[in-house]
Image (cartoon, grey):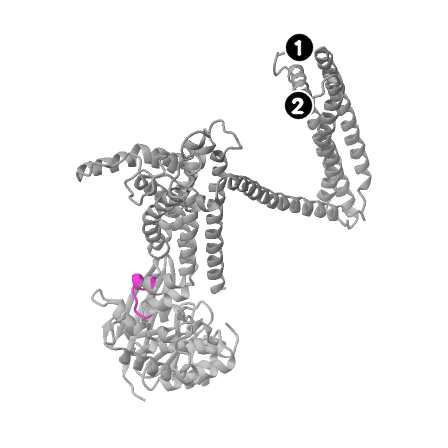
């Protein structure tokens, strides 16, 4: 396991209008590891996740202060471009959201958008590679030009992962990627996460503590907008330091 | 007298409502009633009011019939039924004071007196019968307030009957309009060949007024009128499509909630402006503007009534349709798609262009087609701004005429309803109806299809 710091969040405060959503959150995310964010609903885990690729920019009333360093560069600095940032930091959403286009066009969306390929062969390669990485290629290779919305929920979610991988990101943010899926599809996504961490840094928000325990190397527990405890997943689940973490893990809150 | 009668039975109904409701609510203190007190009240009001109103309605029919039959007896020496009708109408007109013309016939004045006496007695009789009926039913309805009485069920049934009757009425009116249009159209095609009408290149129905005029049979070619309509609709869409589209995109994707909450209603106000006001706007503001522009570019054959003026003002009129429906289509695209695209590093305009518009394409097309059928059916603006001359031209600076304008021209003033000239209006209207019907069906099918996509 490499111990390189990929993202460093320092004293982050987030406000939605007058309401403060995150309080002085500091968190380190290591390269090529899976970090899971757990906590009861409304504790700010998705908000924290969305800060890492600046999706909160889209919420007009959202105000952020504090630092988020990606490879030691503050992503919120004026010189930093959100478009380039989001190429480096891909995102997978709670509900599978393939575009109403063909499977091929879904995966090719990012490379085409950013002009990453010169020829049709290059693009074909990227699409096939990305679909292979997300474990979907074998299932869809005969119907690449059929609509992506026609796939099953689990396949759609893996299509969305392939779409995110196609622009060759360094970090993958996953916002409860399995909450709309059945157990079998969930197991496939979890296997996929284990494979993907060889190449990518992954941050996953999850409601399922079992999932966090299964897939992640590090876990951060959040409560009411505050980061309560963070550490190696094994330690957090076997020997939580904080009373609130213990209560949540044992099912007393949340 | 009738007004007084109506007030009387309405107050009885209100009184019945109050009485039964209060009686039922007292009863409900100690019992579990089948129906809520206000149902008992409504039941009484219904029983009191409706039969009386129905009787009043049919009363006038019956009385009119009786009057006509008895009046005819005064003119029994006349054999011509048309003349008898003329005389009886004269009697009624004189007796009612609508005219002071006395017809020179022995039976006239006696008939007038008979009519007046009949009317007088009728009013009194009507008042007595209907108020008695209403009073009796009112008294009768008071007995029904009981724990077990199913007033709610009766009222529910009445409501269903009323709604069903309204729906049937609306449907039959539609069918009636279409049929009347169809029959007059068929009459028109008795005198003019269908193909001459649909494919003829010359439209001048005015020449057919007198049978001895040259060209009286060959002037019903509808092509110029329909090309005029299409030309103006095309110009209107050229104006409305980009403006409506862009404002919809701005409102749905870029504008803040605050701006949107002001801007959308303001755009929709445009849809509420009466079209005749747009007509003023076309004649007073837009026409001089185009004329001055023409003069500025040394373009002299700029007519003050042209397809361009009518079309552009018509375009302004349909902007809200395009904008509002397109906006609905764009906002119906799930937020998750927008976020998915933005998270891929697409800018807002790339997202709109590559994800949101393709996803809502059906809805956008549907809104355009609805706007086109609005444009084709519009009359007032075109009457005021495009002129009456049915030129076969695609030059937007020429004066053209549209189907609706021709219909207005053909049917204003005194018309004989057996000449092809007048009947041609129905044929035009029928074809126009058919075109807009097809457009509406297509657009509604498309809109429906796109609605299903995300549900």
- Relative to A61, say whether B55 is above or below: above
Residue A240: x %, y % from top left: 44, 81
Distance from Cα at disc 2 to Cα at disc 1? 17 Å
Figure quadrant of residue A56: bottom left
Q: Nearer the viewer, residue A158 or B113?
A: B113
At 34% from the left and 39% from the top, the residue drawn is B391
Q: Nearer the viewer, residue A83 or A247?
A: A83
- Relative to B257, say whether B59 is above or below: above
Residue B4: x %, y % from top left: 69, 24
Q: How many marks?
A: 2
Q: Nearer the viewer, residue A226 or B77?
A: B77
Chain for numbered disc 2:
B
Name the element at disc 2: helix
Q: Mark 2 points at which residue?
A: B82
Figure quadrant of residue A44: bottom left
Labels 2 & 1 near each other (Cβ < 8 A): no
Residue B346 counted in the magenta span:
yes
Which span is picked out in magenta?
B344-352
Residue B268: x %, y % from top left: 41, 45
The quarter of the rendered structure image containing the N terminus of chain A is bottom left
Q: Name the residue under label 1.
A: B104
Q: Nearer the viewer, residue B189 or A129?
A: B189
């Amino acid at each position: 396991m490499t111990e390189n710091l990929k993202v460093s969040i320092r004293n982050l405060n987030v406000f939605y209008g007058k309401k403060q959503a995150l309080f002085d959150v500091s968190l380190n995310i290591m390269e090529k590891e899976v970090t899971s964010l757990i906590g009861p609903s409304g504790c700010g885990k998705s908000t924290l996740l969305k800060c890492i690729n600046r999706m909160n920019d889209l919420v007009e009333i959202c105000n952020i202060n504090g630092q988020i360093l990606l490879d030691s560069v503050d992503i919120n600095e004026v010189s930093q471009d959100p478009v380039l940032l989001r190429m480096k930091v891909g995102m997978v959403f709670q509900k599978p959201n393939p575009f109403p286009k063909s499977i091929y066009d879904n995966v090719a969306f990012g490379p085409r958008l950013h002009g990453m390929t010169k020829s049709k062969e290059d693009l074909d390669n990227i699409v096939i590679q990305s679909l292979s990485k997300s474990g979907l290629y074998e299932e869809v290779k005969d119907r690449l030009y059929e609509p992506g919305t026609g796939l099953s929920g689990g396949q759609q979610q893996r299509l969305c992962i392939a779409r995110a991988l196609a622009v060759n990101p360094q970090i993958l943010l996953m916002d409860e990627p399995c909450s709309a899926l059945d157990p079998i599809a969930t197991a496939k996504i979890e296997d996929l996460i284990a494979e993907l961490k060889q190449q990518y840094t992954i941050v996953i928000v999850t409601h399922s503590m079992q999932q966090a325990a299964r897939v992640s190397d590090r876990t951060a527990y959040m409560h009411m907008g505050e980061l309560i405890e963070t550490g190696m997943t094994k330690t957090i689940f076997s020997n939580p330091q904080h009373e609130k973490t213990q209560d949540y893990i044992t099912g007393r809150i949340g | 007298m009738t007004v007084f009668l109506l007030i009387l039975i309405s107050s009885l109904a209100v009184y019945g409502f109050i009485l039964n409701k209060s009686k039922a609510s007292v009863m409900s203190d100690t019992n579990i009633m089948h129906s809520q007190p206000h149902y008992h009240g409504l039941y009484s009001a219904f029983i009191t009011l409706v039969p009386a109103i129905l009787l009043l309605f049919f009363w006038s029919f019956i009385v009119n019939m009786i009057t006509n039959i008895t009046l005819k007896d005064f003119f029994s020496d006349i054999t011509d039924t048309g003349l008898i009708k003329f005389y009886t109408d004269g009697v009624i007109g004189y007796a009612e004071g609508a005219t002071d013309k006395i017809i020179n016939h022995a039976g006239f004045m006696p008939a007038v007196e008979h009519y007046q006496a009949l009317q007088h007695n009728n009013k009194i009789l009507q008042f007595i019968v209907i108020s008695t009926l209403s009073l009796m039913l009112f008294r009768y309805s008071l007995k029904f307030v009981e724990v077990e009485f199913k007033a709610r069920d009766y009222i529910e049934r009445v409501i269903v009957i009323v709604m069903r009757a309204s729906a049937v009425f609306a449907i039959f009116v539609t069918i009636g309009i279409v049929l009347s249009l169809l029959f007059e159209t068929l009459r028109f095609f008795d005198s003019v060949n269908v193909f001459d009408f649909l494919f003829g290149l010359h439209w001048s129905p005015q020449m057919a007024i007198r049978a001895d005029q040259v060209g009286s049979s060959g002037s019903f070619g509808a092509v110029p009128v329909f090309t005029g309509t299409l030309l103006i609709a095309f110009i209107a869409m050229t104006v409305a499509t980009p403006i409506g589209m862009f404002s919809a995109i701005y409102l749905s994707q870029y504008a803040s909630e605050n701006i949107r909450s002001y801007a959308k209603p303001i755009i929709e106000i445009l849809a509420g402006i009466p079209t005749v006001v747009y007509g003023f706007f076309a004649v007073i503001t837009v026409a001089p503007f185009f004329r001055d522009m023409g003069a500025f570019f040394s373009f002299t054959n700029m007519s003050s009534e042209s397809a361009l003026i009518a079309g552009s003002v018509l375009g302004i009129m349909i902007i809200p349709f395009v904008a509002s429906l397109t906006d609905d289509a764009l906002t119906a695209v799930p937020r998750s798609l927008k976020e998915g695209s933005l998270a891929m590093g697409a800018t807002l305009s790339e997202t709109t262009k590559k994800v949101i518009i393709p996803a809502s394409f059906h809805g956008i097309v549907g809104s355009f087609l609805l706007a086109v059928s609005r444009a084709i059916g519009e009359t007032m603006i075109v009457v005021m701004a495009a002129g009456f001359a049915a030129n076969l031209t695609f030059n937007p600076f020429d004066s053209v005429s549209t189907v609706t304008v021709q219909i207005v021209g053909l049917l204003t003033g005194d018309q004989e309803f057996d000449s092809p000239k007048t009947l041609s209006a129905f044929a035009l209207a029928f074809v126009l109806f058919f075109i807009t019907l097809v457009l509406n069906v297509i657009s509604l099918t498309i809109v429906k299809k796109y609605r299903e996509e995300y549900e």
